[in-house]
Image (cartoon, rainbow, N blue to C red):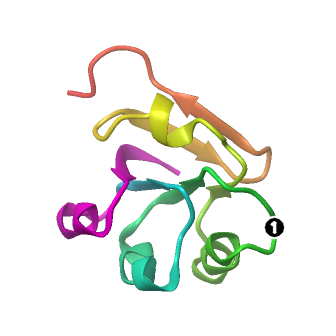
Amino acid sequence: GRGKARVILQPSDLVDFQKGEILVCDAVDPNMTFVVPLASGIIERRGGMLIHGAIIAREYGLPCVTGVPEATLLINTGDIVTVDGYLGLVTLAKGPSN
């Protein structure tokens, strides 16, 4: 999946989530799952194939990379990112997101 990143640091950040954005967060919790169908991918700071976000991503057929410790620090809302769940790669595009 490729799209603009939406970094979620607190519940109020979910309000502005747009269809096609990449969800970047510490971990997907059950209160966040309403935005998952809108996402084009998920990047989680915490890791593991069996954590909630990875399971939800598989259910929706979304690319998901977990265990990216600095994800919420290195990726900013609006950055263009590509998520390759098969290879476990997150690629940040160079230059402005416009």
The amino acid sitting under disc 1 is Met
Residue under the image location 36 percent in, 35 percent down:
76
Check the image and report above or below for 18 versus 77. Answer: below
Q: Is residue 18 magenta?
A: yes
Q: How many marks?
A: 1
Q: Quadrant of residue 95?
A: top left
Residue 63, quarter of the rendered image: bottom right
The residue shown at (58%, 31%) is: 91
Q: Is residue 63 left or right of residue 29?
A: right
With respect to residue 5, does 32 lie above or below?
below
The C terminus lies in quadrant: top left
Tell whether position 13 is magenta.
Answer: yes
Tell me which residue sits at (18%, 62%) in the image.
16
Point 59% across, 35% down: residue: 70
Is 95 left or right of 69, judged from the image as shown? left
Whole-percent x, y for residue 3 in the image = 39, 45
The percent coordinates of residue 5 (x first, y second) are 38, 45
Residue lying farthest to the front in this orientation: 10
Horizontally, residue 70 falls left or right of residue 33, namely right
Kindly state the secondary structure of the residue where label 1 is placed: loop
User: Where residue 32 appears, x then y in whole percent?
Assistant: 41, 77
Disc 1 crowd rating (10 Å Cα; few below 14, some 14-19, many 20+) is: few
Residue range (magenta): 1-20
Residue 7: where, in percent of width, then height?
A: 37, 49
Closer-to-camera residue (5/32): 32
Q: Which residue is mark 1?
A: 49
Residue 48 relative to residue 58: left or right: right
